[in-house]
Image: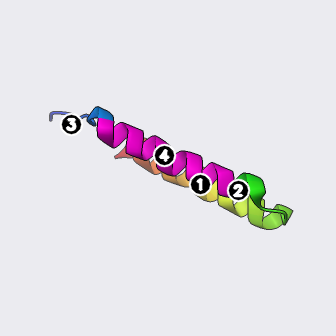
Amino acid sequence: MNDMGMTDKQFNGFIRFLIDDLQEAKEEADTEKKNKRIEKILENLQSTLED
């Protein structure tokens, strides 16, 4: 099975989404909500690695 890589533009777009999600988590004042946002980001990253 061949692995398909991302183009530079796709990778840059992925990083932009990640930065945006992390900024939102950083700005969250409620600790419980902040932790949930970070957990969701981590789950999405793990899912991306497994695809």
Q: Main secondary structure of the magenta part?
A: helix
Residue 39: image quadrant is bottom right
Coordinates of residue 13 in the picture (x, y in percent): 39, 45
Q: Amino acid at mark 2?
A: Ala
Q: Disc 1, disc 4: CB below 8 Å?
A: no
Residue at x 49%, y 51% (from the top left corner): 17
Residue highlighted by disc 2 = 25
Label 2 – label 4 distance at C-alpha: 14 Å
Label 1 neighbourhood size at 10 Å, few (<14), some (14-19), many (20+)?
some
Q: Disc 2, disc 4: CB below 8 Å?
A: no
The earlier-in-sequence mark between 3 and 2 is 3
Label 3 – label 2 distance at C-alpha: 30 Å
Residue at x 15%, y 35% (from the top left corner): 1
Callout 3: SS: loop
Q: Amino acid at mark 3?
A: Met
The earlier-in-sequence mark between 1 and 4 is 4
Label 3 neighbourhood size at 10 Å, few (<14), some (14-19), many (20+)?
few
Q: Disc 2, disc 1: CB below 8 Å?
A: yes
Residue highlighted by disc 1 = 21
| Farthest residue, direction left | 1
Q: Using the image, tell me which numbered label, if any, was put on residue 4.
A: 3
Label 2 neighbourhood size at 10 Å, few (<14), some (14-19), many (20+)?
many
Q: Amino acid at mark 4?
A: Arg
Q: Nearer the viewer, mark 3 or mark 1?
A: 1
Callout 1: SS: helix
- Residue range in magenta is 9-24
Residue at x 59%, y 54% (from the top left corner): 21
Q: Looking at the image, how many numbered discs can be counted on the residues?
A: 4
